[in-house]
Image: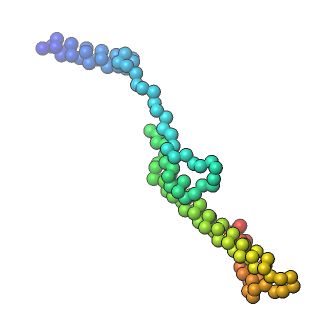
Amino acid sequence: MFWLVVVAMAVVVGGTALVALGGGGTLPEAVHDRIAARLPQDRPLSRTDVDEIRLPMAIRGYRMDEVDDVLDRLGAELALRDSRIAELEAAAVLVGAVEANTPEGEEPLPGLEEFAKVTNHQDGEAGQ
């Protein structure tokens, strides 16, 4: 019985040494984890682009919940910025159209100056 235990231990130790030295085969090459959805290069980013991106995983990588929170905030700020830009562009088009249709020397629509002051005041706050 003693020799059976010694032989079993020798087989286990020998097998472990063989595997540790690479005699039992090698691991396959690691597959590089890549971002599944690429950001578009031909147009500005949108909220959907940010929502669809998922960063690669790593053994000792980032904390997914923290990165996802940052991406959520980035997407919300992009959406807010885009809506503000659209609002200001629409206001500029409206002021330009009214001024273009006002004959020379006549006063434009009543309240247009106040509207322009409010628009300019909001632009000044956004820049600060």
Residue at horizontal 50 percent and vertical 55 percent from the top: 51
- Comparing 69 with 15, the one in front is 69
- Comparing 47 with 94, the one in front is 94
Whether residue 43 sits left or right of residue 34 in the image: it is right
Residue 53 image point, x, y percent: 51, 50
Residue 74 image point, x, y percent: 56, 58
Question: Eyeballing the image, is 63 above or below 20?
Answer: below
Residue 89 seen by the camera: yes
Residue 8 image point, x, y percent: 21, 16
Residue 121 seen by the camera: no
Residue at horizontal 71 percent and vertical 76 percent from the top: 94
Whether residue 114 sits left or right of residue 105 in the image: it is left
**Residue 19 location, quadrant:** top left
Residue sitting at the far top: 3
* Quadrant where the image shows the C terminus: bottom right
Residue at horizontal 76 percent and vertical 74 percent from the top: 96
Residue sitting at the far left: 1
**Residue 25 location, quadrant:** top left
Residue sitting at the far bottom: 110
Question: Eyeballing the image, is 6 above or below 112?
Answer: above
